[in-house]
Amino acid sequence: MIDLFNTSFLWLLFFIIIIIGFSIDLGFLNNIKGRLRKDKKEDQQIIQKVTNKQRTKQALKWTIAWISLALFFSGMIYLGLGTDKFLEYITAYTLEKSLSVDNMFVFSLIFSSLAIPYAYQHRVLSVGILSAILMRVPLILVGASLLERFSFMIYIFGILLIYAALKILLKNEKKEIEIEKNFGVKLLRRFIPFSPELKKEQFFLKKGAIRYATPMLVALIVVEISDLMFAIDSIPAVLAISSDPFILITSNVFALLGLRSLYFLLAGLMEKFYYFRHTLIILLFFIGFKMVISEFIHIPVGIALGMILIILSLAVTLSYIRIKRLNPEKR
């Protein structure tokens, strides 16, 4: 049984890490923007080259930082709550992180479809990720509550995951997003007129007395809708690992907060991760199958974690081999 003091302390530690970490993360972005403003008179190609290099370097630092913070917090869970909760947290975090890679492909398609410049994408993702956290917490609490009250829900969640895997398997891979058909965009245009003009990072543009939605706001809405659809798959998946709201919320938040820096680190390399779509299908099948057979065969969390790591390692290795075969001159 979880000790109340340990859990309370870990909640406090979690909020301190998240608030300080995210504040510093946003501060670095503002520093880069400030440098750009100072360098306006310099040659634009040099600025762009330096800025892109800075962004990639910064994204690498923050990807490492968020993963390190997540691992540090897992150590605190191990010390306070024991091995079982530690394994649940690590497995849920790894699963959420690996499933979110597919979401990054969607982000890339959204930004390219709306022609959102690379320099402005961070604002959409910053607001989008914070909104996603606020949206997911109640979904996690509802899902955990349903599992606790109705044991048969584990079969329903498992079937949903298997169905999601089959749907991805049978669906053609999209090369672009049909923005005009998005429900959120259709609803937005009923209330706010749209202007294709971009005005820096602003979500709204005022022309005379009329306020228009910019492509930035449209991108944010499509990102939010896509994340909601993604959550329908990912939340049942992590519920297969643990039913503890503390484990589910903390692992989910750490995985989401590191998503933006990981996106910018991998920007331009998305096409090289050829087998990650296949990985998503296998992971959803595996977790769904684990939930369906849970009443008859119990798969320990440690074994589930090992399977997830093996699947991810194979995806990375096979993608690397494929790149080498397609580009033999780079060997």
Image (cartoon, rainbow, N blue to C red):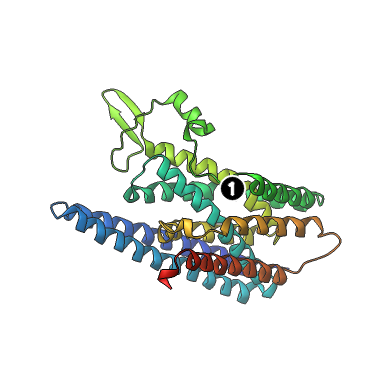
Which residue occupies the extreme left position in the image?
A: 41
Asked if residue 220 shows in the view, the reply is yes
**The image quarter in which residue 330 lies:** bottom left
On the image, numbered disc 1 is attached to which residue?
230
Q: Is residue 191 above or below residue 153?
A: above
- Say whether residue 211 is left or right of residue 325: left
Residue 172 in the image: state x and y as whole percent: 59, 44
Q: Quadrant of the C terminus?
A: bottom left
- Residue drawn at the location 75% of the way across and 52% of the way down: 158
Q: Amino acid at mark 1?
A: Phe
**The image quarter in which residue 197 lies:** top left
Q: Is residue 152 above or below residue 187?
A: below
User: In terms of depth relative to the viewer, which is nearer, 72 or 98?
Assistant: 98
Q: Secondary structure at mark 1?
A: helix
- Say whether residue 18 is left or right of residue 236: left
Asked if residue 142 shows in the view, the reply is no
Residue 52 in the image: state x and y as whole percent: 30, 59
User: In terms of depth relative to the viewer, which is nearer, 293 or 238?
Assistant: 293
